[in-house]
Image (cartoon, helix red, strand yellow):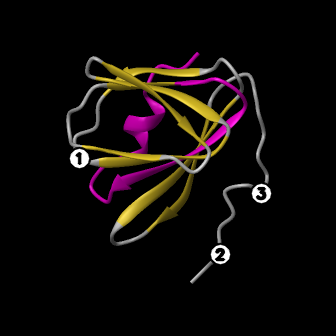
Amino acid sequence: MAIQSFFKDVSYGENVTITVMSNDEISKEVRIVFKAGQEMSEHKAPFPISVMTLKGSIAFAYDDESLVLESGDMIKLDAHVVHALKAREDSIVQLTLNKNDTIKRVEGVETH
């Protein structure tokens, strides 16, 4: 058992930063760090996911909907739902992936 901190060693860089915080027999927990204005373009996951804003504010678009996820807000998406994220301010997001999903897929999402 190990303690992980989503707030330790956070760096707001020129690119969105993706870090695997935990990878166990059930799920993968991923930290995504956004500087204000950075975004992850439209993409979809092959399994259900959950996205939680730990710090900051994220514009979250899915299907034909758009909403804002403030600190502490979480959304769960079914598999194959197209979505995109854009940081309204410096933000930290927790992404929970199915064990069978890959971090390479997440890292392959276009960011800017």
Q: Position of residue 35 (x, y in %)?
A: 71, 27
Q: Which residue is mark 2?
A: 3
Tell me which residue sits at (20%, 34%) in the image.
80
Q: Which residue is mark 1?
A: 47
Tell me the quarter of the picture where residue 77 sits: top left
Helix, strand or loop at label 2? It is loop
In this rendering, would 94 be left or right of 25?
A: right
Q: CA distance from mark 3 to mark 1?
A: 28 Å
Q: Which residue is mark 3?
A: 8
Tell me which residue sits at (70%, 23%) in the image.
36
Q: CA distance from mark 2 to mark 1?
A: 26 Å
Helix, strand or loop at label 3? It is loop
Tell me the quarter of the picture where residue 99 sits: bottom left
Tell me which residue sits at (66%, 17%) in the image.
37
Q: CA distance from mark 2 to mark 3?
A: 11 Å
Q: Are marks 2 and 1 in contact (CB under 8 Å)?
A: no
Within the magenta stretch, is there residue 93? Answer: yes
Mark found first going from the N terminus, 3 or 1: 3
User: What residue span does the magenta drawing correspond to?
Assistant: 86-112
Label 2 CA crowd tier, 10 Å (few <14, some 14–19, many 20+): few
Q: Amino acid at mark 2?
A: Ile
Q: Position of residue 103 (x, y in %)?
A: 43, 45
- Which residue is at the far bottom? 1
